[in-house]
Image (cartoon, rainbow, N blue to C red):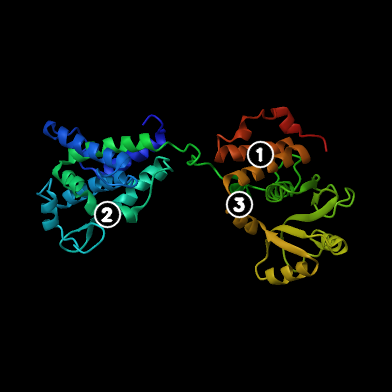
C-alpha cells in the first residue's frame, strides 16, 4: 500500500470501519483457514479452475471480497448468533433459491446483503477510491456465477469477524499489487476560481486609488473571452481608452489573423429600455455593429426585471447577443478547472498588463488568496506598497 496517499488511506480506513465490526488479528486456530481461502482466490485469479480451459475468472477476487462483506453484514444482523455457517445463514435469512444472484434477506423482507451490491462496493473501492482503473468490472457475470464459488463462500462463513477481516486485507493487498495505480486518474480538489470571481468579486473601485469604474467588469469579461475564444487573437485597451481612437469596434475585439471575428462591449450597468441606447449605454456600439456586420456580444451587469425581452430584441435587431453576469456565471459553472484557471489568469493579465493598475491587480490577488491560498499566481513577486499606492501612470 506504499503508493496510497493520505486521502486514499483515510477513505480506505472509513470503508473498512463500515464493513467490519472487528478489526483485529484472527484467532490462532483460524490462520490456516484464512490462508487457504486467500490461496484459493489467488489461484482462481491467476490460473482459473483446475482442469478447465478458458481465461481465469479475474472477477473472482472481487466476488470473494464481496462474500466477506456480505457475511459480515449477515452476522451483524443475527444478534446473539455470531459466526453463522452458510447453511445457518440460509435458514435464518430467507433467500430466493431461483434467483441468479445471491441475496440474504431478513425475515421481514428487508435486504441485508446483496452480493451484487457488495461487489459494486468493492469495485468502487478499487477503481474510484484507490485509483485502480485497470480493475475488472463484470458484476453481472460474477454474481450470476456465484454458485461456482460455494467452496469459498462456505469458507467465508466459517470464519470469525476477525478472520474475515484478515482475509479481506490479504485479498486487498493482492489486488493492489496486481492493478497498478493510475496516477493521472484522481485529482485533488481544486478551487474553481473564475466562477467565484464572476459571482462574488467586488467590482466597485475603492476610494483612494486611480482604479476606474468598470475596470473589474472589463477584466472579468476579458478573462472570459480569453478562455472561451482561445482560437482568436484579442485586442483590448484600458477602460475609457476609446474604441474609435484605437480603431476598434467594441471594448474587446477578437481577430483570426487580419479578420475581425467577434467584438464585445462591456458595461458595468443595470440597463433598461430607457438607458440602453443612450450615450452611457450601447447606442454607439449598436451603430458600429450595424455598420460592420461583425458577430457581437454585449455583456452588462444586469437587465432590469421586465425589460429583458424588449432589450434583447432591440439588440438582436442590430446583430448583438446580450449576456449578463448571471449568464456568464451559468456558463462558467460548466467549465473544467483548467479553463476556469485560464480565465482567472487572463483577468490578472488584463489588470496588470493592459490596464496597468497595480492596485487593481493587488486587490484581485487578495481575493484569490482568500479563496485559494495555494494558487500559483500568489507565488509571483507582489507589487510593493509604494507601487500599489501610486499605481502606474495613466
Query: Which is closer to the viewer, label 2 or label 1?
Result: 2
Between discs 2 and 1, the one toward the N terminus: 2
Q: Secondary structure at mark 2?
A: loop
Between discs 2 and 3, the one toward the N terminus: 2
Q: Quadrant of the C terminus?
A: top right
Q: Position of residue 169 (x, y in %)?
A: 27, 36
Nearest the viewer among 309 and 147 is 147
Residue 45 drawn above or below residue 253: above
Between discs 1 and 3, the one toward the N terminus: 3
Give the CA separation, mark 2 to mark 1.
63 Å
Q: Residues within 10 Å of mark 1 (few under 14, many from 20)?
A: some
Q: Quadrant of the N terminus?
A: top left
Number of numbered discs visible in the structure rendering: 3
Residue depicted at x 55% and y 38%: 372
Residue depicted at x 69% and y 71%: 309
Residue depicted at x 77% and y 59%: 296
Mark 2 = which residue? 145
Residue depicted at x 85% and y 49%: 258
Q: Residues within 10 Å of mark 2 (few under 14, many from 20)?
A: some
Q: Are marks 2 and 1 in contact (CB under 8 Å)?
A: no
Nearest the viewer among 309 and 335 is 335
Residue 331 drawn above or below residue 386: below
Q: Position of residue 302 (x, y in %)?
A: 67, 60
Query: Which is closer to the viewer, label 1 or label 3?
Result: 3
Nearest the viewer among 242 and 385 is 242
Mark 3 = which residue? 199
Mark 1 = which residue? 363
Q: Secondary structure at mark 1?
A: helix
Q: Is residue 238 left or right of residue 368?
A: right
Give the CA separation, mark 2 to mark 3.
53 Å
Amino acid at each position: 500500500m506504499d503508493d496510497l496517499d493520505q486521502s486514499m488511506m483515510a477513505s480506505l480506513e472509513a470503508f473498512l470501519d463500515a464493513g467490519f465490526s472487528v478489526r483485529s488479528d484472527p484467532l490462532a486456530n483460524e490462520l490456516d483457514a484464512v490462508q487457504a481461502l486467500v490461496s484459493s482466490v489467488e489461484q482462481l485469479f491467476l490460473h482459473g479452475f483446475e482442469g478447465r480451459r478458458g481465461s481465469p475468472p479475474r472477477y473472482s477476487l472481487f466476488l470473494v471480497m464481496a462474500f466477506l462483506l456480505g457475511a459480515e453484514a449477515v452476522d451483524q444482523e443475527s444478534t446473539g448468533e455470531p459466526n453463522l455457517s452458510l447453511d445457518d445463514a440460509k435458514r435464518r435469512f430467507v433467500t430466493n433459491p431461483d434467483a441468479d444472484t445471491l441475496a440474504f434477506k431478513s425475515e421481514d423482507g428487508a435486504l441485508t446483503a446483496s452480493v451484487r451490491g457488495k461487489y459494486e462496493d468493492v469495485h468502487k473501492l478499487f477503481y474510484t477510491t484507490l485509483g485502480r482503473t485497470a480493475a475488472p468490472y463484470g458484476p453481472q457475470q460474477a454474481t450470476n456465477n456465484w454458485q461456482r464459488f460455494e467452496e469459498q463462500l462456505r469458507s467465508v462463513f466459517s470464519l470469525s469477524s476477525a478472520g474475515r477481516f484478515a482475509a479481506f486485507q490479504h485479498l486487498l493487498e493482492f489486488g493492489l499489487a496486481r492493478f497498478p495505480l493510475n496516477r493521472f486518474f484522481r485529482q485533488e480538489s481544486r478551487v474553481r476560481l473564475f466562477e467565484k470571481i464572476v459571482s462574488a468579486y467586488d467590482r466597485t473601485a475603492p476610494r483612494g486609488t486611480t482604479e476606474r469604474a468598470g475596470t473589474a467588469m472589463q477584466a472579468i469579461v476579458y478573462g472570459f473571452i480569453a478562455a472561451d475564444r482561445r482560437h482568436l487573437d484579442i485586442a483590448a485597451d484600458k477602460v475609457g481608452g476609446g474604441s474609435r481612437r484605437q480603431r476598434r469596434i467594441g471594448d474587446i475585439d477578437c481577430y483570426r489573423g487580419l479578420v475581425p471575428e467577434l467584438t464585445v462591449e462591456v458595461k458595468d450597468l443595470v440597463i433598461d429600455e430607457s438607458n440602453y441606447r443612450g450615450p452611457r449605454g450601447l447606442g454607439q456600439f449598436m451603430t458600429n455593429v450595424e455598420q460592420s456586420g461583425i458577430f457581437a456580444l454585449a455583456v452588462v451587469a444586469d437587465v432590469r426585471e421586465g425589460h429583458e425581452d424588449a432589450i434583447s430584441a432591440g439588440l438582436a435587431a442590430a446583430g448583438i447577443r446580450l449576456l449578463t453576469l448571471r449568464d456568464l456565471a451559468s456558463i462558467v459553472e460548466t467549465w473544467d478547472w483548467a479553463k476556469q484557471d485560464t480565465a482567472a489568469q487572463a483577468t490578472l493579465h488584463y489588470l496588470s498588463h493592459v490596464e496597468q493598475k497595480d492596485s487593481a491587480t493587488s486587490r484581485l490577488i487578495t481575493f484569490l488568496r482568500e479563496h485559494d491560498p495555494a494558487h500559483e499566481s500568489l507565488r509571483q513577486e507582489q507589487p510593493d506598497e509604494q507601487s500599489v499606492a501610486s499605481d502606474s501612470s495613466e
